Amino acid sequence: VEIIVKKDARVRYTTIQNWSHNVYNLVTKRAVVQEGGVMEWIDANLGSKVTMKYPSVYLVGERAHGEVLSVAFAGDGQHQDAGAKMIHAAPHTTSIITSKGISKGTGKQSYRGLVKIYPGCKGAKSTVRCDALMLDDTAQSSTYPYMEVDEDDVTIGHEASVSKIGEEQLFYLMSRGMTEAEGTAMIVNGFIEPIVKTLPMDYAIEMNRLITLQMQGAIG
């Protein structure tokens, strides 16, 4: 997928993918954003044996903005390797990367990202946040952030967290009448809520349904 965002234009490209377990999902997504333009990639990756997907945004005009919001779910035997690339090639450009990864069973989930700021890109700002949630002891999660900054007058932020569903959380929810599966689903839905709330209602409902089924091992 290739997108060109003209001056002061705005584009949002949303994808929810649910492949069967024998699929290798290797995707190229890139966008070029001109002056004052805005590009948003919103991505949900479920199913497939292997996914390698890194949407990129080339910010070539002053005040251009790029944003990537992604969710990846890796179940048994799956490897979800997802991330983003933000290339700042003009002054006062801004970017945000938000990544949510969930892994279960023997699933492996990785975040792999790049932020590049070229010389002369004064006032550029970039924020990266990648969070991982592991549903059991055998799940795996990795983070590979890379930042290359060749300009002094910039603001860069990076946050990362890895967490596991706690017994106390589940105990509390089960004491309120939920089953363990229902409690786990509620915690996962809360974890991905920052991404889901950006989706149109029908997309949000479908994504929550697919993730619930994925946790039950019913799809993919």
Image (cartoon, grey):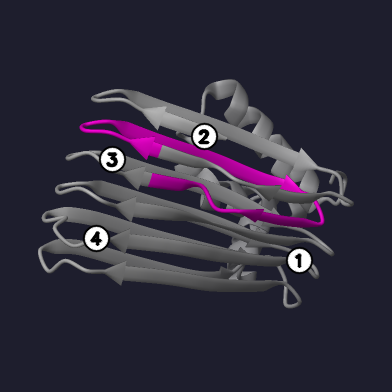
Residue receiving disc 2: 2
Q: Which residues are magenta?
A: 32-57
- Decide: is 115 above or below 106: above
Q: Earlier in the sequence, mark 1 or mark 2?
A: 2
Give the amino acid at mark 1.
Gly
On the question of residue 177 being in view, the answer is: no
Give the amino acid at mark 4.
Tyr
Q: Earlier in the sequence, mark 4 or mark 1?
A: 1
Q: Residues within 10 Å of mark 1 (few under 14, many from 20)?
A: many
Closer to viewer: mark 3 or mark 1: 3
C-alpha separation, residue under disc 4 versus residue under disc 3:
15 Å
Quadrant location of the N terminus in the rendered image: top right
The residue lying furthest to the bottom in this view is 137
Instruction: Tell me which corner region of the image, top left, top right, bottom left or bottom right, holds residue 155.
Output: bottom left
C-alpha separation, residue under disc 4 versus residue under disc 1:
36 Å
Give the amino acid at mark 3.
His
Q: Are marks 1 and 2 in contact (CB under 8 Å)?
A: no
Question: Residue visible at 36% across and 60% down?
Answer: 128
- Decide: is 48 above or below 203: below
Residue receiving disc 4: 118
Where does the image place residue 170, in percent across and percent down from the top left? Answer: 65, 62
Closer to viewer: mark 1 or mark 2: 2
Q: Earlier in the sequence, mark 4 or mark 2?
A: 2
The secondary structure type at the circle numbered 2 is: strand
Question: Residue visible at 88% across and 45% down?
Answer: 218
Residue receiving disc 1: 107
Residue receiving disc 3: 65
Q: Residues within 10 Å of mark 2 (few under 14, many from 20)?
A: few
